[in-house]
Amino acid sequence: MSSNILDERRQSLEDQFFHKQSQENLDSLRKQLAQQTSKEELRKASGMTDDAVLDKLVELGIGAETVMALSLVPLIFVAWADGKIQEEEREAILQGAQKKGISKDAPAFGLLGQWLSQQPNESLFGTWESYIKALRGKLSDQESAQLQAQVTRFARFVAESSGGFLGIGKISNAEESALARIEAAFRG
């Protein structure tokens, strides 16, 4: 897949990620994230820990703006999978965002808050899937598997956070379907 297609899908993912949100907050967030291109900055924006994957993302010219979308969109998708967000899911996402270095006064935190209050359009996740499929063509099998593991690990944590009774039914069928769709995007 050509680099141009990857760039087009990246731009589409970013456009969907920032669609119809508070323009002032988004302009501030985009400006802040556009300046973050080092491996450490990508680590902070995404919470990813695998150096090989981060090195490859830097090599491909993928900035913090895109990496943030890569890591947050699946969480929101899983949390809304059953049509509503439980308080435990909300807390897991917000605490995870803070652990990634997204402070409560950051524009990204406000964006998450909006998504947790109002379900984003399905096209956001569809755009994320398209971007993952294009990105996968630029990664080795091992890098793709490592990226998948990092993205799905936190998505699964969000799905499990809403509980169940005595460990039974911890993840709803809708959440399992959402997790399967996330994993499928990495397989093609």
Image (spheres, rainbow, N blue to C red):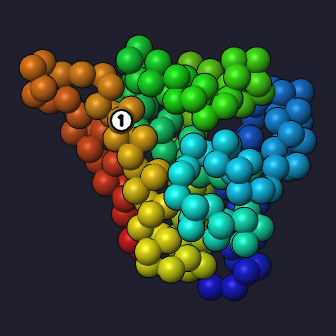
Which image quadrant is residue 13 in?
bottom right
Q: Tell me: 41 left or right of 181.
A: right
In this rendered view, identify the residue nearer to me: 27 or 39. 39
Helix, strand or loop at mark 1: helix
Count of picture labels: 1
The residue lying at 61 percent from left, 45 percent from top is: 46
Residue 165: x percent and y percent?
12, 18
The residue lying at 29 percent from left, 47 percent from top is: 177
Residue 140: x percent and y percent?
50, 80
- 157 w.r.t. 187: above or below: above
Q: Amino acid at mark 1?
A: Phe
The residue lying at 76 percent from left, 17 percent from top is: 105
Locate the N terminus and report the quarter of the image it occupies. Answer: bottom right
User: Which residue is tagged 1?
Assistant: 157
Few, some or many C-alpha atoms within 10 Å of disc 1 (few <14, some 14-19, many ≥20)? Answer: some
Q: Is residue 14 visible?
A: no
Residue 96: x percent and y percent?
52, 29
Locate the C terminus and report the quarter of the image it occupies. Answer: bottom left
Q: Tell me: 108 left or right of 112.
A: right
Q: Tell me: 25 left or right of 156.
A: right
- Residue extending farthest to the bottom is 2
- 69 w.r.t. 6: above or below: above
Q: Is residue 46 visible?
A: yes
The residue lying at 49 percent from left, 71 percent from top is: 143
Q: Tell me: 30 left or right of 100.
A: right
